[in-house]
Image (cartoon, grey):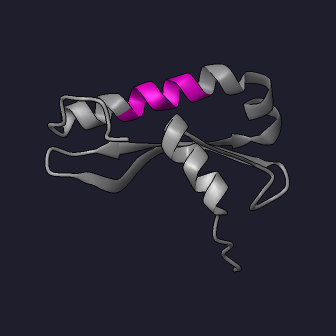
Amino acid sequence: MTRRRPSAARLDEIRITGLSVSVDEIAEGAAGIAAPSSTVTAWSWRGLVLGATSQRVQAEQSRLAALVVDGAHELSRVMGFGGEPPA
């Protein structure tokens, strides 16, 4: 398996939007939407990820992305973080 590092521009976009969308990057026909989650002590390497077919994600990307972001924020809240994730 080959791992490609995201570009600096892509990482900046993810930091700004709080969202990562991948369509057909790892495997043809597969897509993922991810949002980071934080804890009381610090921003961490946690997140909520939704995997689906590329066709489904492309057809409903806005709605699915909003659900993932909301879910990640709820996960942060349950884990004890009460504010917005740090920028």
**Picture layout, residue 19 above or below residue 6:** above
Which residue is painted at 65% across and 54% down in the image? 9
Q: Nearer the viewer, residue 47 or 28?
A: 47
Q: Is residue 16 visible to the viewer in this orientation of the structure?
A: yes
- Asked whether residue 73 is drawn in magenta, I would say no
Q: Which residues are magenta?
A: 65-72
Q: Nearer the viewer, residue 48 or 15?
A: 15
Measuring from the top left, give residue 58's x and y in whole percent.
79, 31
Which residue is painted at 18% across and 36% down in the image? 81
Q: Nearer the viewer, residue 57 or 81?
A: 81
Question: What secondary structure is the stretch in magenta mostly built from?
Answer: helix
Quadrant containing the C terminus is: top left
Measuring from the top left, give residue 41's x and y in whole percent.
14, 51
Side (left or right) of 62 relative to 37 = right
Q: Nearer the viewer, residue 17 or 21?
A: 17
Which residue is painted at 73% across and 33% down in the image? 57
Q: Is residue 50 visible to the viewer in this orientation of the structure?
A: no
Determine which quarter of the picture holds residue 70: top left
Measuring from the top left, give residue 72's x and y in whole percent.
39, 35
Measuring from the top left, give residue 5's x and y in whole percent.
64, 70
Find the residue positioned furthest to the bottom: 1
